[in-house]
């Protein structure tokens, strides 16, 4: 089933918000880090992984989720966090290392956690699989509503923890969906040189569950496939494995020279940028007018700028609080 008009507007708004957020982060990241690069300097310390181009995966899946559903994500999490409804002001403050951040500035951009909407992420490859499967098991054992979705990269399926979690999800028939974001590159390693199968959705057969690959970074096709998988999970019919072809328009991290990409690859990907493609489709289908989409884009830009201002104007964590929120009492 195609997304409704309201769903299309929601999807476009969140895609644009994510892109404007990443653009703002990219502008700010190198402040204080030049002429000699030091990752610790500037208003945004640490590594930074942007999700430009991968927005369709987040909105296509999260359009079907509620705050009670659990999402775990990767080290490239901003698009998914925004689509899941994570507080944008507090997420920006967390990235800036501020006291008003989701974790008081202690987690940074690879460890975003918002209990209000059941979202978490990690910089460890495939780490989110176990917690997501555990959340699905908890809901099944306690008779609670909700499904769990783990977003992973295509390289994560080669980790032992990924297979262990998939096996348990299948054995216990859990309300769980694994979504593989296949952007073709594990840091600088091409998928075909690190994975034995071209289509990771075929791995679902090893666990006796449905598997499906969605080509083309198409938000509409992702929405349909994710809707079917999540409905199946809600109905008690068990887990599903989805692999989505998507595109990383930025490097693996801020400062990545991307010398590993074949000549012309990146230019070709920008020609398939999913945001102008969705705008054109919505206009052609009559799902929105140009004025409506212009308004969505302006509101998204304003929302992001407000979040960035909130982060910049927030206080740094107090030195005397350095050990709070770190160790349990």
Image (spheres, rainbow, N blue to C red):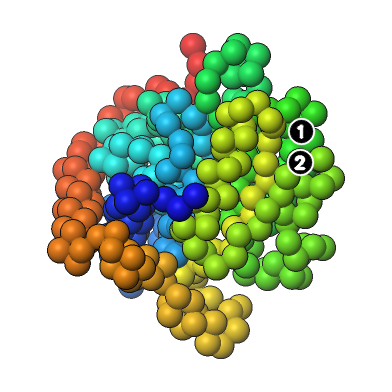
Looking at the rendered structure, the secondary structure element under dot 1 is helix
In the rendered structure, the answer to whether residue 253 lies left or right of residue 160 reads left
The answer to whether the residue labelled 1 contacts the one labelled 2, judged by CB atoms less than 8 Å apart, is yes
Residue drawn at x 84%, y 45% as measured from the top left: 206
Q: Position of residue 35 (x, y in %)?
A: 33, 72
State whether residue 230 appears in this view: yes
Q: Position of residue 45 (x, y in %)?
A: 38, 51
Q: Say which label, 1 or 2, has the lower sequence index.
A: 1
Residue that label 2 marks: 209
Choose between 91 and 212: the one closer to the eye: 212
What is the crowding at mark 1: few (fewer than 14 residues within 10 Å), some, or many (at least 20)? many
Looking at the rendered structure, the secondary structure element under dot 2 is loop
**The quadrant where residue 81 appears:** top left
Residue drawn at x 60%, y 11% as measured from the top left: 142
In the rendered structure, the answer to whether residue 157 lies left or right of residue 177 reads right
Residue 170 numbered mark, or none: 1
């Amino acid at each position: 089933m195609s997304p409704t008009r309201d769903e299309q507007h929601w999807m476009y708004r969140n895609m644009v918000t994510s892109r404007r957020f990443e653009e703002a982060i990219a502008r700010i990241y190198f402040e204080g880090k030049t002429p000699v690069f030091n990752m610790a300097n500037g208003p945004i310390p640490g590594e930074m992984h942007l999700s430009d181009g991968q927005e369709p995966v987040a909105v296509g899946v999260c359009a079907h989720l509620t705050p009670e559903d659990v999402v775990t994500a990767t080290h490239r999490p901003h698009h998914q966090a925004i689509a899941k409804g994570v507080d944008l002001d507090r997420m920006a403050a967390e990235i800036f290392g501020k006291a008003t951040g989701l974790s008081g500035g202690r987690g940074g951009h690879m460890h975003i956690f918002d209990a209000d909407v059941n979202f978490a992420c990690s910089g460890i490859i495939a780490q989110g699989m176990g917690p997501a499967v555990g959340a699905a098991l908890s809901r099944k054992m306690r008779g609670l509503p909700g499904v769990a979705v783990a977003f992973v990269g295509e390289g994560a399926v080669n980790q032992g923890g990924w297979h262990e979690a998939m096996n348990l999800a299948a054995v216990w028939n859990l309300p769980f969906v694994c979504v593989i974001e296949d952007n073709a590159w594990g840091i600088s390693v091409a998928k075909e040189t690190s994975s034995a199968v071209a289509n990771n959705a075929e791995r679902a057969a090893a666990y006796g569950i449905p598997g499906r690959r969605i080509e083309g970074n198409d938000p509409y096709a992702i929405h349909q496939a994710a809707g079917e998988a999540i409905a199946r999970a809600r109905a008690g019919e068990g887990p599903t494995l989805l692999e989505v072809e998507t595109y990383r328009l930025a490097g693996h991290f801020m400062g990545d020279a991307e010398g590993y990409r074949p000549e012309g690859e990146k230019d070709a990907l920008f020609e398939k940028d999913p945001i102008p493609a969705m705008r054109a489709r919505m206009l052609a289908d009559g799902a929105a007018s140009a004025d409506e989409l212009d308004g969505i884009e302006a509101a998204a830009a304003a929302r992001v700028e407000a979040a960035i201002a909130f982060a910049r104007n927030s206080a740094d964590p107090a030195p005397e609080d350095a050990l709070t929120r770190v160790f349990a009492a």
